[in-house]
Image (tube, grey):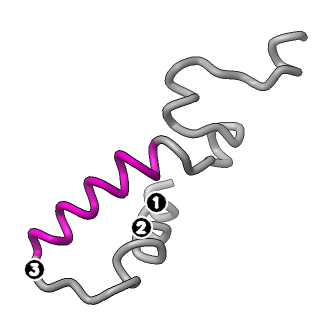
Amino acid sequence: MSESFFATYKKELIHTKPWPTVKHVKNDTFDWIETYYNTQRRHSTLEYLTPQEYELGYREISQIAA
């Protein structure tokens, strides 16, 4: 699972523009994880929920009704 995360991280953030300093990379990495990766991006290993939804206990309606 970590290999998939780092492949996504590189594709969606790191290789998108030149980085003038390591500080810029660190700041943008934090923003990418906190504002996109954990809150908006759906993950197949979490039943296509975002990590935030998964942690809050969201489930698909079909699972709740069963």
Q: In which quarter of the image is the C terminus?
A: top right
Which mark's residue is nearer the viewer, 2 or 1?
A: 2
Q: Does the magenta stretch include residue 32?
A: yes
Q: Residues within 10 Å of mark 1 (few under 14, many from 20)?
A: few
Residue drawn at x 81%, y 12% is 64
Tell me the kind of residue under disc 1.
Phe
Res. 9 mark: 2
Going from N to C along the chain, the mark reached first, 3 or 1, is 1
Tell me the kind of residue under disc 3.
Thr
Q: Position of residue 16 (x, y in %)?
A: 40, 83
Considering only vertical position in the picture, is 8 above or below 1? below
Q: Is residue 65 magenta?
A: no
Res. 23 mark: none
Q: Position of residue 38 (x, y in %)?
A: 45, 43
Q: Where is residue 5 in the image (x, y as percent from the top left)?
A: 46, 60
The residue lying furthest to the bottom in this view is 18
State the residue position of label 1.
Answer: 5
Which mark's residue is nearer the viewer, 3 or 1?
A: 3
Going from N to C along the chain, the mark reached first, 3 or 2, is 2
Q: How far apart are marks 3 and 1 (CA)?
A: 23 Å
Q: How crowded is mark 2: few (under 14 residues within 10 Å), some or many (20 or more)?
A: some
Residue drawn at x 36%, y 57% is 32
Residue drawn at x 57%, y 28% is 54
Tell me the kind of residue under disc 2.
Tyr
Q: Are marks 3 and 2 in contact (CB under 8 Å)?
A: no
Q: Do the residues labelled 2 and 1 touch (CB within 8 Å)?
A: yes
Q: Position of residue 47 (x, y in %)?
A: 71, 37
Residue drawn at x 46%, y 51% is 37
State the residue position of label 3.
Answer: 21
Tag 1's secondary structure? helix
- From the viewer's perspective, is 52 left or right of 65? left
- State the extent of the magenta-drawn residues as a range: 22-38
